[in-house]
């Protein structure tokens, strides 16, 4: 498990030995209602999220209002009912005039808030609001101009990799670093809604850290919380998960999002995984010390007089573990007792005339 690198968002260290940073992705789950967006911010805080993330675009900044086949949603697409990309994004976008209010609401709760910008003007808006970091959505990882523009803000950047291959990630990281951004996190992501567990390839997470010398994590689109828990066990320092307030919600991304209760359970499970992982430690823990009865050690299995020469029939390796270590058994054979012992007495160095190493 590799968690050496770290970044800092709002004075919080992410990576290294720090707890996993958990992001609640609002995306389009506000359903076009600012009050619902505010409720989601409060629910995310209540559920234990460390941050809430928005998406900053309009339909016209992310695509063209065009009816040519390239811009139409194909049959079988999760959002095909919206017909075209422009219509989908017109339905899903977060109005820019909401951003200031949403930032203030999250900040009042001491909940980190930032966004995924999809063009230069979105970056400018987020800079005016004092965003502490940027998220680059999976499809934008190849928008090198946008990455360079984001990098020049000097803020940490979190990259998703859902539609990127290795060379795409390498180019994106090099672009960020060459434009002054060294605080980079890369999230393993599979752009499928919902993502089948057998397409997660979570073993990539520690390899990301090793290959790119950066913080790694998971942007998750699976159902449930098996993938996030597994990711944390593999060294993920960031978990991002889409979030709704109510399981009956029918907003654009609701079908692959966790509701408030499910998100809270995910957070609790992640924290339990972290507790179980602990640190590298070969010592017997405090709780295990109470079970020393289960450990083997040497005991006399005969009542013997002073001056007796110990034989193999006199000593056994048995439970509990209060006597001498079993590895010393050969050294006791042939030694002379300096006092009498009873059946069930511990074998210890002080009861023989010779010198035992342990």
Image: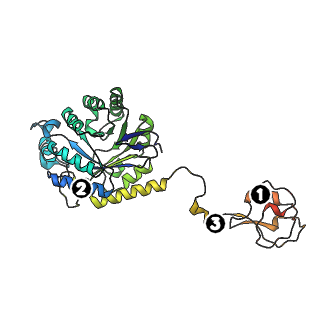
Give the quadrant of the C terminus. bottom right
Relative horizontal placement of residue 358, taking residue 229 as reference (left or right): right
User: Is 334 situated above or below 343?
Assistant: above
**Crowding near pointer 2: few (<14 within 10 Å), some, many (20+)?**
many
Marks 2 and 3, how far apart at CA: 49 Å
Q: Circles 2 and 3: CB distance less than 8 Å?
A: no
Earlier sequence position, callout 1 versus callout 2: 2
Q: Is residue 192 left or right of residue 65?
A: right
Find residue 252 and report its horizontal and vertical position in percent: 18, 51
Position above or below: 9 against 221: above
Q: Which mark is residue 328?
A: 1
Between the residue at mark 1 and the residue at mark 3, the CA separation in whole angstroms equals 19 Å
Give the residue displayed 30% in from the left and 31% down from the top.
151
Camera-side residue: 300 or 128?
Answer: 128
What residue is disc 2 on?
Answer: 244
Residue furthest toward the top?
178
Q: Position of residue 112 (x, y in %)?
A: 30, 47
Which SS class for mark 1? helix
Q: Residues within 10 Å of mark 1 (few under 14, many from 20)?
A: some
Instruction: Please rate how many residues cluster around mark 3, counting C-alpha atoms within 10 Å: few if below 14, some from 14 to 19, many from 20.
Output: few
- Mark 1 and mark 3 residues within 8 Å of each other at the beta carbon: no
Q: Earlier in the sequence, mark 1 or mark 3?
A: 3
Q: Mark 3 falls on what kind of element? A: helix
Distance between the alpha carbons at the discs numbered 1 and 2? 63 Å
Find residue 72 and report its horizontal and vertical position in percent. 13, 41
Residue drawn at the location 23% of the way across and 58% of the way down: 245
Residue 172 percent coordinates (x, y): 32, 31
The residue labelled by disc 3 is 294
Q: Earlier in the sequence, mark 2 or mark 3?
A: 2
Q: Is residue 283 above or below residue 206?
A: below
Residue 12 located left or right of residue 349: left
- Residue 338's place in the image compared with 1, above or below, is below
């Amino acid at each position: 498990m590799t968690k050496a690198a770290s970044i800092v968002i709002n004075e919080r260290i992410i990576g290294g030995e720090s707890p996993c940073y958990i992001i609640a992705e609002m995306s389009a789950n506000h359903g076009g209602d600012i009050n619902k967006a505010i409720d989601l911010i409060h629910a995310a805080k209540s559920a234990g999220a460390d941050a809430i993330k928005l998406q900053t675009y309009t339909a016209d900044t992310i695509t063209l209002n065009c009816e040519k086949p390239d811009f139409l949603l194909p049959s079988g697409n999760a959002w095909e009912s919206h017909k075209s990309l422009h219509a989908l994004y017109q339905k899903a976008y977060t109005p820019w005039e909401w951003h200031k209010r949403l930032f203030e609401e999250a900040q009042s709760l001491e909940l980190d808030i930032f966004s995924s910008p999809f063009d230069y003007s979105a970056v400018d808006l987020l800079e005016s609001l004092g965003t502490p970091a940027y998220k680059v959505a999976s499809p934008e990882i190849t928008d090198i101009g946008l990455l360079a523009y984001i990098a020049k803000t000097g803020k940490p950047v979190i990259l998703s990799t859902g539609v990127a291959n290795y060379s795409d990630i390498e180019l994106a990281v090099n672009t960020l670093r060459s434009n002054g951004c060294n605080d980079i996190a890369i999230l393993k992501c599979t752009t499928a809604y919902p993502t089948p567990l057998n397409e997660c390839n979570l073993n990539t997470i520690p390899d990301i850290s090793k290959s790119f010398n950066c913080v790694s994590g998971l942007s998750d689109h699976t159902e449930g919380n098996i993938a996030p828990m597994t990711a944390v066990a593999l060294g993920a320092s960031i978990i991002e998960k889409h979030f709704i307030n109510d399981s009956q919600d029918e907003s654009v991304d609701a079908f692959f999002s966790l509701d408030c209760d499910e998100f809270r359970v995910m957070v609790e499970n992640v924290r339990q995984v972290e507790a179980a992982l602990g640190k590298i430690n070969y010592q017997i823990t405090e709780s295990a010390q109470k079970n020393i009865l289960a450990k083997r050690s040497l005991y006399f299995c005969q009542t013997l007089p002073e001056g007796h020469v110990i034989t193999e029939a006199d000593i056994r390796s048995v439970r509990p573990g209060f006597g001498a270590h079993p590895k010393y058994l050969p050294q006791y054979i042939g030694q002379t007792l300096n006092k009498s012992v009873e059946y069930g007495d511990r074998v210890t160095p002080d009861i023989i005339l010779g010198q035992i190493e342990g």
